[in-house]
Amino acid sequence: MTLMASGLLAATNASASLLNGDFSQVGPYGNGVVTNAIGASWSSAADWIQFAPEQGGSVGTYLIQNGGPSGLSNALYVTSPAPSDSAFYEDGAGIYQEIGAGLHAHAEFDLLVLQGTVTCGLYQESGPFLSFTTYSPSGDWIHITQDDNGISGGIAFEDLYNSNAIYEVANVQETQQAVPEPASVLPVAMGVGLIAVRRRRSGTKS
């Protein structure tokens, strides 16, 4: 899939930021939420959505107070049991927060992988991750920073590889600039801009 916008781009200083990245607020369904196959719902953390594969599998979340690095921050505990028949495993299970289309996104977070593998970071507005970086158990928390100039839509944490992942996330931050609107009223002689974003794999965040 290709998204294209032509015309002169108007400058903007508007920006958007992620909500409840410190996991201090419980979601509307309380603490301890499980979502089964072909589903998505609010997670145990407010403003975060958890999602399960289209066929088989599930995802569960639980907020741990002072469970982050050095016990100084909250953490979201995530489990994603794989389906019994991996042939039905079409998409990963995990959590995400959508911010909306943005440029020059910057993300930071702490990750503790206890089991399996976790693919995480900024994702395109059209679905796939901007960079398919996958993490395995390391025995301790790691701090991850990501910057990308593509058109991002938010941040996600997902078990893409049917690995029965168990992990914790803490201290998530993301900021990005709004995508400029075409300034069609400017003279055409001033030039033409073009933005093209191409999917790099068929998988999506949900």
Image: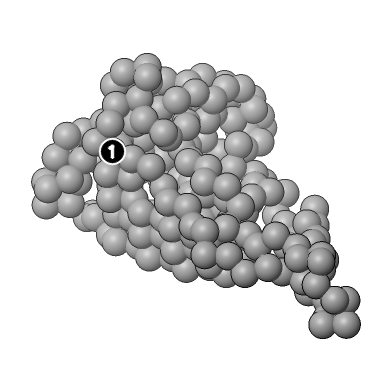
- Indicate the position of residue 103 as horizontal and vertical percent values: 57, 63
Placement of 160 over or under 25, stated as above or below: below
Q: Residue at x 79, y 62 (%)?
A: 5
- Residue 192, given in percent of the width and then of the height, sits at 83, 76
Residue at the left extreme?
A: 71
Residue found 11% across the figure and 52% down from its top: 70
Determine the image quadrant of residue 140: bottom left
Please tell me in which quadrant of the rendered image residue 191 appears: bottom right
Identify which residue, 5 or 91, lies in the foreground: 5
Name the residue that disc number 1 marks. 23
The total of numbered circles placed on residues is 1
Mark 1 Cα shell of 10 Å, populated few (<14), some (14-19), many (≥20):
many
**What type is the residue that disc 1 sits on?**
Phe
Q: In the depicted view, which residue is nearer to us: 57 or 194?
A: 194
State the residue at coordinates (41%, 55%): 174
Does the rendering let one see residue 120? no
* Secondary element type, mark 1: loop
